[in-house]
Image (spheres, rainbow, N blue to C red):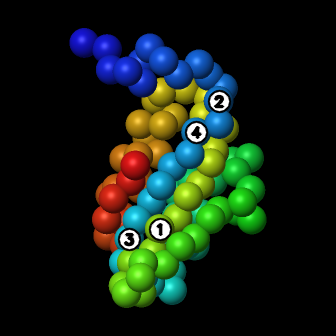
Amino acid sequence: MASYKDTLLEFPCDFPLKIMGKAHDELAQVVLTIVTRHAPDFDGASMEMRASSGGNYLSLTCTVVATSKPQLDALYTDLTAHPLVKVVL
């Protein structure tokens, strides 16, 4: 059964990832390390960060040049496996 990602994405393409986690000094560096492992051309300076209103959570947006569905699947798997990361959209 094909998901919408199997059929609607044409690679390569710009693909925004929204990563949310507990506000922690290391969260941005951890996310940057994981993202660049899968998308070596990602420019860390383009990462957008927003703190939640209470300051307990941090939202990071990384737009990568996706080259394949397996690349995105591996990226999601590695990000969601990290204990500082709570949600990846």
Q: Which amino acid does label 4 sit on?
A: Phe
Q: What residue type is labelled 1?
A: Ser
Which residue appears at 65% of the width and 62% of the height?
47
Asked which secondary structure carries label 1, the reply is strand
Which residue position holds label 1? 59
Which residue appears at 41% of the width and 82% of the height?
53
The reply to whether dot 4 and dot 2 touch (C-beta < 8 Å) is yes
Which residue position holds label 3? 21
Q: In this view, does 79 lie above or below 74?
A: below
Q: What residue type is labelled 3?
A: Gly
The alpha-carbon separation of the residues under discs 1 and 2 comes to 22 Å
Q: In this view, does 42 lie above or below 12?
A: below
Asked which secondary structure carries label 4, the reply is strand
Q: Is residue 14 visible?
A: yes
The alpha-carbon separation of the residues under discs 3 and 4 comes to 20 Å
The mark found on residue 15 in the picture is: 4
